[in-house]
Amino acid sequence: MVTAFVLINVQDKNVKRIAEQLLTMQGITEIHVVAGEYDMVAVVRVTNNQLLSELITERIMHAPGILRTKTLFSLQCFSNVDLKKVFGA
């Protein structure tokens, strides 16, 4: 499983509408509205880097209202939950 955190700036600050739109995209498991330099963070979990690349470059970046993104790749995860079991990967 590949996990990434996509930091997102939105144009119209209608974060609820954009968050709902992003959650319809396969691979995006959570959207967090945050304070600071970015408006929201999308948690992405996919099976491989190719799917991650397609999701970010072909879908997220072209979604209405998205100004820019920055992607952080997870190298290692520590969790109290069996994420592979929860997300079926």
Image (spheres, grey):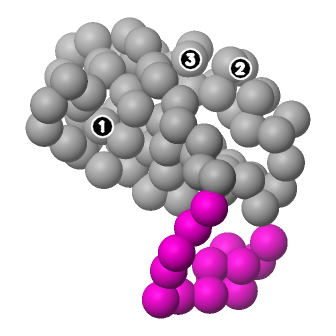
User: Which of the pair 41/60 is nearer the observer?
Assistant: 41
Which residue does the numbered mark 2 point to in the structure image? 58
Q: Please indicate whether residue 20 sits to the left or right of residue 56 in the image.
A: left
User: Which of the pair 39/70 is nearer the observer?
Assistant: 70
Mark 1 or 2: the one toward you: 1
Tell me the CA gap for discs 2 and 3: 6 Å
Q: Amino acid at mark 3?
A: Met
Image spot of residue 57 (x, y percent): 68, 19
Q: Secondary structure at mark 2?
A: helix
Q: Residue at x 22, y 15 (%)?
A: 12
Which residue does the numbered mark 1 point to in the structure image? 40
**Residue 79 belongs to the span the image colors magenta:** yes
Question: What label sits on residue 61 in the rendered view?
Answer: 3
Nearer the N terminus, badge 3 or badge 1?
1
Circle 3 crowding by C-alpha within 10 Å: few under 14, some 14–19, many from 20: some
Q: Residue at x 77, y 28 (%)?
A: 54
Mark 1 and mark 2 residues within 8 Å of each other at the beta carbon: no
Q: Secondary structure at mark 3?
A: loop
Q: Secondary structure of the magenta portion, mostly?
A: loop
Q: Secondary structure at mark 1?
A: strand
**Image quarter of residue 61:** top right
Mark 3 and mark 1 residues within 8 Å of each other at the beta carbon: no
Q: Is residue 88 above or below residue 75?
A: below
Q: What residue span does the magenta drawing correspond to? A: 76-89
Image spot of residue 46 (x, y percent): 74, 53
Q: Residue at x 27, y 12 (%)?
A: 11
Tell me the CA gap for discs 3 and 1: 14 Å
Q: Amino acid at mark 2?
A: Glu
Mark 2 and mark 3 residues within 8 Å of each other at the beta carbon: yes
Q: Is residue 81 above or below residue 11?
A: below
